[in-house]
Structures are given as structure tokens and as C-alpha cells.
């Protein structure tokens, strides 16, 4: 007769806990399977959950490894985009510094133009009178 343990981490779709049992045949005596306590029970809410534990472990490990690989892939992509974003921020910072420098230069040139405008006007008027 198969020994029965309640497997607390796994529940069936019917809501009942799955039981962990060892195989009943000689070849499978060291293997365990999980099934719903309602598995193959007539009169109760009939359930068909039946999983060999090593198959479930293999499937779980594959899913876990896939999740780890996917997380690493997205982490790598995130790091690459973060590097690109930092580079764009640096370029933007340099562009703003250049804009500030050009604004200061423009202001200085405008002030120089305002200061020299009367002199330029006098020179223009004088040269126009002389040319007559």
C-alpha cells in the first residue's frame, strides 16, 4: 500500500491539497507522485490531478531557469539603455553649457554694438559729407 503525505505547497484546481505518495509497483517504489485526495474517488468531486514528483521538479526547474534567463536578459537590456541614457544626458548637459556660453557671448556683443553704434553713425555721416 502506498504511503500518504499531504503535500502542503500544492493544491489542486478543486481546492484540495495534493497528497504525496510513493509508487506501488516494485520498479517505482522509490519514486513519488502527487495527486489530489479526490483523485479517482467515486462519489466525491472527481479530480484527475496526477503528477510524478520528478517530472514536476524537472518542469519547475526548467521554468525557474527560464525566468532567471529572462530576468538576466532584461537586466542586461536595462543596463545598456541606462548607459545610452546617461550618454544622452551628458551630451545634453554639454549642449546646455554651450548654449549658456553663446548667450553670454551674444550679450557681450550686443553691449559692444550698442556702445559703438553712435561712433559708427558719426563715421557714416562724416564719410557721407566728405564724399559730397
Image (spheres, rainbow, N blue to C red):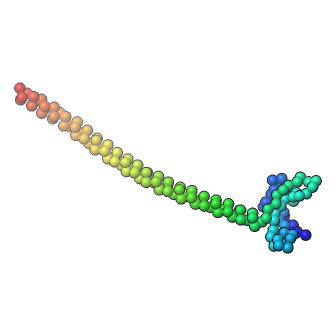
Q: Is residue 104 left or right of residue 60?
A: left
Q: Position of residue 129 (x, y in %)?
A: 8, 27
Q: Is residue 8 visible?
A: no
Q: Position of residue 14 (x, y in %)?
A: 83, 53
Location of the N terminus by quadrant is: bottom right
Q: What residue is at 37 percent from the left and 48 percent from the top?
A: 95
Q: Is residue 63 visible?
A: yes
Q: What residue is at 43 percent from the left and 51 percent from the top?
A: 88
Location of the C terminus by quadrant is: top left
Q: Nearer the viewer, residue 95 or 64?
A: 64
Q: Nearer the viewer, residue 76 or 55?
A: 55
Q: What residue is at 79 percent from the left and 60 percent from the top?
A: 10
Residue that sits furthest to the top in the current view: 132
Q: Position of residue 128 (x, y in %)?
A: 10, 28
Q: What residue is at 28 percent from the left and 41 percent from the top?
A: 106
Q: Position of residue 21 (x, y in %)?
A: 84, 67
Residue 121 image-quadrant placement: top left
Is residue 35 placed above or below 29 in the rendered structure?
Answer: above
Q: Is residue 124 left or right of residue 61?
A: left
Residue 28 image-quadrant placement: bottom right
Q: Nearer the viewer, residue 94 or 109?
A: 94
Amino acid at each position: 500500500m502506498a504511503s500518504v503525505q499531504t503535500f502542503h505547497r500544492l493544491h489542486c484546481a478543486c481546492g484540495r491539497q495534493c497528497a504525496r505518495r510513493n509508487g506501488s509497483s516494485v520498479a517505482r517504489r522509490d519514486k513519488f507522485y502527487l495527486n489530489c485526495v479526490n483523485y479517482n474517488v467515486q462519489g466525491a468531486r472527481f479530480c484527475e490531478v496526477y503528477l510524478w514528483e520528478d517530472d514536476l521538479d524537472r518542469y519547475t526547474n526548467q521554468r525557474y531557469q527560464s525566468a532567471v534567463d529572462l530576468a538576466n536578459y532584461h537586466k542586461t537590456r536595462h543596463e545598456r539603455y541606462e548607459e545610452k541614457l546617461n550618454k544622452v544626458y551628458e551630451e545634453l548637459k554639454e549642449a546646455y553649457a554651450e548654449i549658456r556660453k553663446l548667450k553670454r557671448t551674444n550679450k557681450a556683443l550686443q553691449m559692444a554694438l550698442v556702445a559703438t553704434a553712435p561712433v559708427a553713425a558719426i563715421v557714416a555721416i562724416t564719410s557721407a559729407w566728405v564724399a559730397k
